[in-house]
Amino acid sequence: MGYLSTMTVAPFVAALLIMLVPSNRPWLTRLIALGASLVSFAISLVVLAGYSWQAGGFQFRETYQWLPQFGVQVLLGVDGISVPMVFLNAIVLLTGTIVTFKIADRPKEFYALFLVSVAGVFGVFCSVDLFVLFLTYDIAGLPMYILIVAWGSTRKEYAAMKLAMMHVAGSLFVWVGMLAIYVQAGSKSFDLEFLAAQAQVLFPPAFQQIFFPVIFIGFGFLAAMWPLHTWSPDGHGAAPTAVSMVAAGVLMKLGAYGIIRVAVWLLPVGAQFWSPFFVTLGTIGAVYGGVMALAQRDFKFVIANSSVSHMGYVIVGIATLSLAGMNGAILQMFSHGVMTALFFAMVGALYDQTHTREVGMFGGLARTMPWFTGFFVIAALASLGLPGLSGFVAELLIFLGAFQTYPVVGFLCIATVALAATYMLRMVARAFFGPINPQWTHLRDLLPAEWIAGVLLVATLVVVGVYPAPFLDMINASAAPVIERVGGVR
Amino acid sequence: MELAWLAPVLPAGAFALNVLVWRQMGQARHLLSSLTTLAGIGGAFLVFLQVFGDAQANLEETASGPARHLILEGLRWFSIGSGGTASIFAPTLVIDWLSIMMLGVVTFLAFLIEVYATGYMKGDNRYWWFFSVKALFTAAMLGVVLSYNFLIFYISWEMVGLCSFLLIGFWYQERDNAEAAKKAFITTRVGDVGFFVGLALLYVATGTFDMKTIFDAVEAGKVDPTTVTAAGILIFIGAMGKSGQFPLHIWLPDAMAGPTPVSALVHSATMVAAGVYLVGRAYPLFHASETTMAVIAAVGTFTAIFAASIALVQRDIKRILAYSTVSQLGYMIMALGIGAYTAGLFHLFTHAFFKALLFLGAGSVIHSMEPVLHGTGRNPNDIFNMGGLRTKMPITFWTFLIASLSLAGIPPLAGFWSKDAILLGAWEHGAYLPLAIALLTAFLTAFYMFRCIYLTFFGSPRWASEPHASADAVHGAHAAHGHGHGGHATPHESPWAMALPLIVILVPAIAAGWLGMPGIYAPFEEAVRFGPVVEEHLNIWLAIAGSLAGLLGIGLATLMYLRPVSGPRLLGQAFPDTYRVLLNKYYFDELYQWLIDRVVLAIAAMAATVDRKVVNDTFTDAPGPIFSTLGDWLRRTATGRVQHYAVGFVLGITVVGAVVAGLVPDLRITLW
C-alpha cells in the first residue's frame, strides 16, 4: 500500500475496528480514532513536504484494477490542487477527533460514522478516476445525515434531512454529467487525466456547453453556491461540533474541488461559455451571505452565513477563469476550511457549557475564557481578511482575478469585506467584551484537548498567512495548466 | 542604510517574544514584556540614528537621479504564474528623507511614550499585553513608513488598524470602550475598501503593486488618466479613514476610550498621521490628477474648520485634543491638496511632537484626577471637574502650556513655523479660500486650547466639591452628579516615569520648527520635497496674520474663561441652537447610527426573512410536498390486481428487448 491509500483507508479501518470495540470501553474507541487520525495526519504531512511543485502533475500515484470491463480503476494521485485539500482534511480530522473526546453519548457509533465520512473525503481528493471520485463523494456526504440526527441539536431532523436531500440532489446532477462524459468519451475510461488530455477531441463544444452547468450546479450544492446554500446554516447550526467542522471545513470544499477537477478541467469550452453566469452566482452568494450574517443572532448562524459568503468568493475565483482567481480560490478553500474548523471547535467549547449560542446572551467572556476568546478572535480576524492570516492572500488573489475580468464583481467582493468586518466584530464585541454577564461567571476556559486543537489550527492560519509561497507554488503549478486550457487571464 | 529593515523587525521580535515566551512567566511577564518592548523600540530608534547619519553622508550619492532615495528589494513573498509572466509579490523598502523623518518621529515618540506608559499603566493586570500590542503597533507602523510596495503598505496599514482596535478596546470590560474599538475598526475598514479598490485598479493597469513602477508608469503617461484619477481618489478614501477626515472622522474622538499613552502615540502622533503620510508617499499618483488634488484639498480644508468648531464646546479633555487632531490633520491634508507638499509634511512632523506632548499632559492630569474623583461618579476627563491644577502639577502645566502655544502657532515655537509654511503655500498656490479658512481655524484652535488650559489649570478647584457652575451646559443636564464631597486625595504631580518624557518631548515641541525657517535655516525643505528646491522667503504679513489669529484666540479665551464663568454661559444662552449642534458634533454619530440601525440592519433583517421564507421554505422545501403528492398518486398504481402488473411487465420487457436488440440507436449523443 502506498501513502495515499494508507491515508485514505486508515480512518475506514479504524471505523471498522471501532465497531468491534465493546460499548463500555469508550477510551479504546477514542484511542483507535486518534491513532487513525494521527496516521492520516502524518501521511498528509509527508505528502505536503514531498510533493514537488517543480515537477507538477499527479504524484504519489497508485493504480489498482477494479472493474476493468467498465474501465473503472482505483487511480490515486495528488496534484498541487489536492495536496492542500488533503492536508486540510487531515488537520480537520485530527482536531475534530480531539475535540470530540468529551462526548459521552454513544462515542463508538459517532466515531465510526465520522471516520467513514472523513475517509470518503480523502478518497475524493486522492482519486484520479471519475468513478471512484463520485463514489467516495457520496460516502463522504451521507453519514452526515445520521450524525446530525443522532447527535445534533435544535432543528436537527429537519436540518439533517435537508442536508441529505440536497446532497443527493447535487449527486444526481453530477451523476448525470459523469455518465454523459463516460458515454460521450466512448472509450470506457473514467481516468480523469486521459479524459482531460483528450477533451478537445472527445467533447464537442455543444456537449460541453450543455453539461458544464449540470456538473457545476451538481457540485455547487455542496459548495453552498447561491441559491443552493440553504442547507448550510441549518446544517451547521444543528450539527455536533466535529461534524460542523467537517461539514463546513471540508465538505463544502468537496463541491468546489469537484467543480475545478471535473467541470472546469474536463470541459474548458463550457467553462468559458458559462463563466459570466457563475461569476454572477458567486458574487450574489458573497454579498448575500455577508448581508445575512449581519442579521443573525446565533454564533453558528453567523459563521454559517459567513461561510456562504466566503464560498461565494471561491466560486467567483474559479469562474473568473483567471490565474490569480483560481490560485486564490484554491488557497481560500484551504484557508476557509481551517478557519471554520477553528470557529466551530470554539463554538462547541462554549455550547457544551452553556447550551445556548445566542450571541446576545453573553458579554465579557474575554475575562473568564481568555484562550477561548483569543482563538475565536483570531478566527474572526482571519474571516474578515486580516493580513498575516491565510485568508488575506487568498482573497487578495481572488479580488485581483475578479478585477482583471469583471471589475464590478471585484468591487462588490471588496465591499463585502467591510461587511465581514462588521458582522464579525459585532459578534466579538458583543459576546467577549463589555461587562461580564453574571450568569456565565462559572464558565471554564478551554479543555486541554480543545486547546491543542486551537493551537494547531491557529498555527496553520498564521504560517500560511505569513509565508504563503510554498502553498501557492504548489497550487499554482496545478492551477496554471487548468487556466491555460480555458485560455483564461494570466 | 541597508539595515533599515531591522527597524520594524526588532519590535516585531519583541512582540513575538512577549506573546510566545514571556506570557508563560507568571507575574514576571509584566516586567519582562515592558523591558522587551522598550528594548525593541529603542533598538529601532538606534537603527534610525544609523540610517539618519548614513543618509546625511551618502543618500545623495547612492541614489540615482533626482529621486534621492535608496530602494531595498525584499525576498519573494509569494508569486503566481511562472517564468516570464509570473507576478511576484515581494516587500520593497524605501529610504528617502520622508521615510527617515517618519522613522525618527515614530521611534522617538514610541520610545518615550512607552517609558511614560510604564508609570501610567502600573498595576494594570494586563500590563504585559499592553506592551506587547504596543510593540506590534510600532512594528506595523514602521512597516507603513518604510514600504515601497502598495501591498506591503496596505498590509502594515491593516496591522496598525488591528493594534488600534486592540488598544482602544484595552479596557474592554466597559461596554463603551468595546463599542469604540469596533467603531474605529469598521469605519477605517470602510475607507480601506476604497484603498483596496484603488490598488486593484492600479494593479490591473500596471500589473504590479511596486510603487516605483507605478509612479514611473503614471509619470510616463502609460496609465489611462481616468484610472489615475479614480485610483487616486479611491486610495485617498483609505487615507481619509485612517486620518479621520470628514465624513469618516467619527471614530477618532471615540478612540480616546483607550489608555492615554495609546491616544498620544496611536491616535495623534503616528497612526492617524499615516493617512497624511500616504498622501505624501503616493504624491506622484495624486499630483498627476488635478481632480484628485482638488478633492484632497477640499476634504482637508473642510475637515480643518469642521473639527475645530466641534472642539470649541467639548468638555472631555481628551476629546478636545482628539477634535484638535482631526482638525490639524485636515490642515496637513489641505496643504498637500493645494500643492504645498513640504508644508503639509512639515506640519505632520512638528504636530506629532506637540500633540503627543498635549496628550501625555492630559494623561498626567487624568491620572491625578482619577483618585481624587474616585467614587464620586464624576468624570475625571471632564475639564469642568478640574481647575486650579497649575500649582499642583507644575511640570504638567508648563509643558502643556508650551505645547498649546506651539499648537496655537505662536512664534517662535514649532507650530508657528509649520503653520506659517502652510499659509505661505496656500498664498503661493493662489488658494485663497483655503488660506482664509486656515486663518480662521488657527484662531479657533488657539481659542479652544486656551479654554481648555484655563478651565484645567486656572481658576478655583472644582474637584474638591460639587461643581457650582455647570458652565457651558445650556440646561445643566450634562453636569456631573456627584455623590460625595469629592475624593479624599488631592491632585499631585505624576511620577518621574511620566514627567520625564514630558520634558524630553518638550524640546522638539519647541524646536522642531526651526528646521524649516524660510530664508533663515530650512534643511527640512531641502530634504523632504516634491520636485526641485524652491527658495522660500518669509512673508512677514502672513506670519503676522497667522500669529495674530492665534493671539486673538488666546485673548478671547482669556476674556471668557480666565474669570469664570459668566461669558460661556451667556454664549450658550445666546446661541442655544448652535451650541447644541456643536456639542452634539453636528449629529453625525446619530446620523450614522440611524443609517446602520434603520438601513443596513433593516436590509439585513429583510434579506434574512426572504432567505428563510422564500429561498428556503418556498423553493428548497418545495420538493418535499411535491414528492409526497407524487407518491400518493403512484401508490394508486399498486392496485393489488395481478392483471395490472402483468401489463406493466410486458411493456417493460418490450422496451428492454428493443434496446438490447439494437432497435433503439446508440446512447451516445450524436446530435452534434
Image (cartoon, coloured by chain):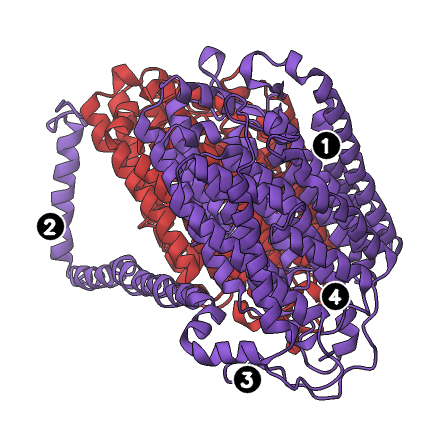
Chain colours: A red, B purple
Q: Disc 1 vs disc 3: which is toward the camera? A: 3
Q: Do labels 2 and 4 share a chain?
A: yes
- Spatial separation of the CA atoms under disc 2 and disc 4: 99 Å
Query: Which chain is mark 4 on?
Result: B
Residue A176 makes an appearance in the image: no
Q: Which residue is drawn at 65% across and 86% down?
A: B468
User: Which residue is found at the position 62% from the left and 52% from the top?
Assistant: B407
Which of the two discs, 2 and 4, sits closer to the camera? 4
User: Mark 1 sits on what residue?
Assistant: B7
**Amino acid at dot 4:** Val
Q: How far apart are marks 4 and 3 (CA)?
A: 24 Å
Q: Name the residue under label 4.
A: B365
Image spot of residue B535 (x, y percent): 55, 25
Question: Hey, what amino acid is under mark 2?
Answer: Val
What residue is shown with label 3?
A: B476
> Is the residue under label 4 in contact with that under label 1 (CB below 8 Å)?
no
The amino acid pointed to by label 3 is Gly
Q: Is mark 1 on a helix, strand or loop?
A: helix
- Name above or below for residue B213 compared with residue B489: above
Q: Percent x, y for residue A425?
A: 53, 57
Tell which subunit mark 3 falls on. Answer: B
Left or right, A411 with respect to A119, comes to left
Farthest right residue? B28
Q: Distance between the residues labelled 1 and 4?
A: 33 Å
**Marks 2, 3 in one chain:** yes
According to the picture, the residue beneath numbered tag 2 turns out to be B647
Question: How packed is label 1: few (under 14 Cα within 10 Å), some, or many (20 or more)?
Answer: many
x and y, in percent, of residue B253 in the image: 56, 60
Q: What whole-number distance in Å separates the C-alpha atoms at marks 2 and 1? A: 89 Å
Give the camera-side residue of B663 and A141: A141
In this view, the residue in front, B607 or B250, is B250
Circle 4: is it few (<14), some (14-19), or many (20+) Cα within 10 Å? many
